[in-house]
Amino acid sequence: MSSLRPFCLTAWLAAPAAAALLLLTPVSQSRAQAQTAQATPAPSANSSSSQTTVAATQPAAQQRGITARAIDKVKEVAKSAGDIFSRVPCLPPKGGSKPMGSLPHVAAKLVAGKPVVIVAFGSSSTAGYGASSPEFNYPNRLAAQLHRKYPGADITVVNAGVGGEDAPEMMKRLQTQVIDVHPDMVIWQVGTNAVLRNLDPDDTAKLVEDGISRIQAAGGADIVLIDPQYSPAVNQRKESAGKMIKLLGKVAELRHVGIFPRFEVMRDWHENQSIPVESFVIADGLHMNDWGYACFAQLLGDDIIRSVGQIKLGVNVPADVRAYRPM
């Protein structure tokens, strides 16, 4: 494994520090200026007054220097995130693309110019743990991509990710945070914490299937499941992870919903595209960094856009073959 340090982890540490400096600087400047006013004697004909004034204003000048450096650091971090794919391109898995079905509900809404609501439901990798800022979590990345593609569309991507949860906890908030929002699409990331907590994959699969049934009964939103990530922490539990991935695939097939094979996509980055794991997973060996979230969102968004194109071309994909597989 390469010793390359994850560039986004540095950004994650630098950005809050720079932001803190920006927040504190105006207060420090005003205090320094107040102290200067108090320390400066009334003007006189001798040279000591001018020397005192120069000496008293030096702390404020130093603070302005700190502010400038903080601003430069923030700009550097923003640029680093902005040109993220110029370093490592985001490519779909090698080996050609498999036929995919459509996401008829959200695609039809976009074609008709109607508002679209997408709920990203999941745990910490939906909430965005490991990203340098909320702007770079996958739901916000996905929203930005769709807004660029459809600038006149009313698209809302709701981030309903809560760190540490899996199917048992998610089912408790399924009604209020998903169904009651009346989404056109639900992207449900699930299964990783179940693997890490040694929960029975069969129990998780049953809960997910029940959740899908409830969402479908409430309005028929398009649904895409996201399986666990390819990462050192997950790979340590290879048998459980493999069973979880297989069962989620079966649930998707049984309930005629889509699945984004995140594990296989991320494994392709490493094994076929020769991208070091440290370049898309942070130092905890589990969560994605800015690049990982960005590429994940890009591939997901590309297929939503492709589905909209199918609707525009009049491609009619029956609901019972909505096999969403960006491979």
Image: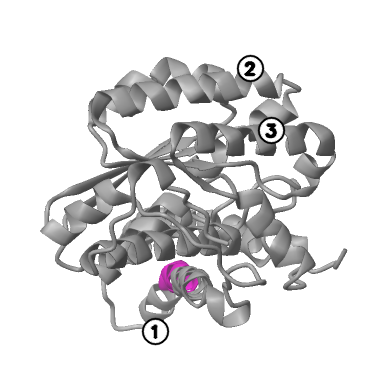
Q: Quadrant of residue 240?
A: top right
Above or below residue 247? Residue 105 is below
Q: Quadrant of residue 312?
A: bottom left
On-image quarter of the C terminus? bottom right
Which residue does the numbered mark 3 point to in the structure image? 244
Alpha-carbon neighbours of circle 1 within 10 Å: few (<14), some, or many (≥20)? few
- Which of the two labelled residues, at mark 1 and mark 2, occupies the earlier sequence position? 1
Q: Position of residue 94 (x, y in %)?
A: 66, 72
- Point 58% across, 73% down: residue: 91
Q: Position of residue 289 (x, y in %)?
A: 61, 57
| Of residues 162 and 225, the one drawn nearer to the viewer in this rendering | 225
Image check: 324 left or right of 196?
A: left
Amino acid type of the residue that numbered disc 1 sits on in the rendered structure: Ser
Which residue does the numbered mark 1 point to in the structure image? 47
Q: Position of residue 182 (x, y in %)?
A: 23, 32
Pair 1/3: label in front? 3
In the picture, the disc for residue 203 is: 2
Q: Which residues are magenta?
A: 56-66
Please check the rendered image and state whether residue 63 is part of the magenta-colored stretch, yes or no.
yes
Labelled pair 2, 3 in contact (Cβ < 8 Å): no
Q: Main secondary structure of the magenta part?
A: helix
On-image quarter of the N terminus? bottom right
The colour scheme used to paint the residues is one colour
Please check the rendered image and state whether residue 123 is part of the magenta-colored stretch, yes or no.
no
What distance separates the C-alpha of mark 1 from that of mark 3? Answer: 80 Å
